[in-house]
Amino acid sequence: MTATLTDRRRAGDDPSAPLLEVDDLTVAFGDGPGSVRAVENVSLSVGTGEIYALVGESGCGKSTLGYSLLGIVPPPGRIAGGDVRFRGRSTTAMPKNELNGLRGSELSMVFQGAMNAFNPVLTIGTQVEHILAAHPGRFSSDEEGKAYFEHLLELVQLPPERIWKSFESQLSGGMKQRVAIAVALLLKPSLVVLDEPTTALDVLNQRLVIDILKELHRELGVTIIFVTHDLAVVAELATRVAVMYAGRLVESGTVDEIFGAGRRHPYVEALINAIPSVLDSGLRVKPIGGSVPNLARLPQGCRFAPRCSLAEDLCRSTEPPLVGDAVGHLVSCHVVNRGLDGDAAGADSNGTAPHADREGAAS
């Protein structure tokens, strides 16, 4: 009953292959000249068992990217280009009924509005029973499925006997968030996308959710994509990070590379400088001036240039490519990448690193 996801992976799976690959993905809202690209030419790969963070301010496209991984971009949004592959199979080209079969059982998501995700007139237990009834082959019996959900409730530090018979209105915000995480894991998915799971919580519940996610990752071996604007959470929880700005990937690498003293995109530098310090009370937080540009009226050249103190004439006229260094740390910035050979470093003419360079070290 409590076997990890690793225990039940198919024998034919290659453990060295990425679990999820995103190749030059573009997500647009609307058609024709007035369409807006919320995600543009994004490529990344996520390995089995990773905790991978998607970071950026509101409006950067990170949640839309998360939705696209499960093929649930709300209309009039659509995948306008590129591909998403799960275990080497394209989900963008997959028949709808087949993709529906993957959702929940292999790919799952905890939405940003998880506190409003439950039916208010049904108990949590009844809703879980409906999920189990819709996936009759996932467990050998309904009793096994119910017992597994109760095990998940214990992992998220909730009393099963209370939660099972409760309505959502009888639960606090922090409890609802944890129940939503347990429900997302009910069918033992290989990958779970969590969209801002700590944003609406107080500090104590944020701390609890972070600790619970660490425990779930250790206990179940589940791969996690963590969508957030909070770099402080990322530094503690994630193994690798991709930072988005105005729909494009501006930097990706390991947590050590992003938070270390190496080359770093000015936007990422600004995000880190905006984190309050509990160790140095005299350190001034530096807010980022300006705001994310309107995706319907993007500036020419680098999209961050209007807010960047390092911006030069080249930045304001030409979009910078995404260039990787010798270890695969990718940055999209003319100034930061000056002196690096883009072709030798592994970026193509579109600023997208080849799969060989993204796998394992970058995205």
Image (spheres, rainbow, N blue to C red):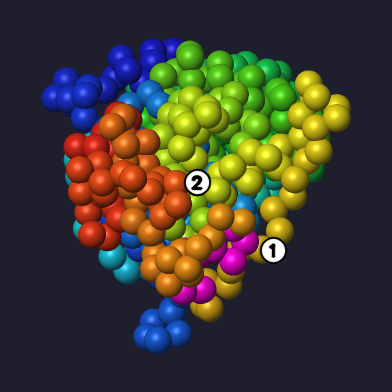
Q: How many marks?
A: 2
Q: Is residue 72 visible?
A: no
Q: Secondary structure at mark 2?
A: loop
Residue drawn 17% across and 20% down?
11
Residue drawn 39% across and 68% down?
318
* Magenta span: chief secondary structure: loop
Give the vertical position of 143 relative to 92 (above or below): above
Camera-side residue of 330 and 128: 330
Task: Please name the amino acid that badge 2 sits on.
Answer: His
Relative side of 40 to 83, left or right: right
Q: Give the label on residue 290, or none.
A: 1
Q: Quadrant of residue 275?
A: top right
At which x and y percent is residue 248? 43, 57
The residue segment tinted magenta is: 298-308
Sequence-wise first label, 2 or 1: 2
Residue drawn 64% across and 20% down?
211
Q: Give the label on residue 19, or none.
A: none
Q: Is residue 114 found inside the magenta-colored segment of the image?
A: no
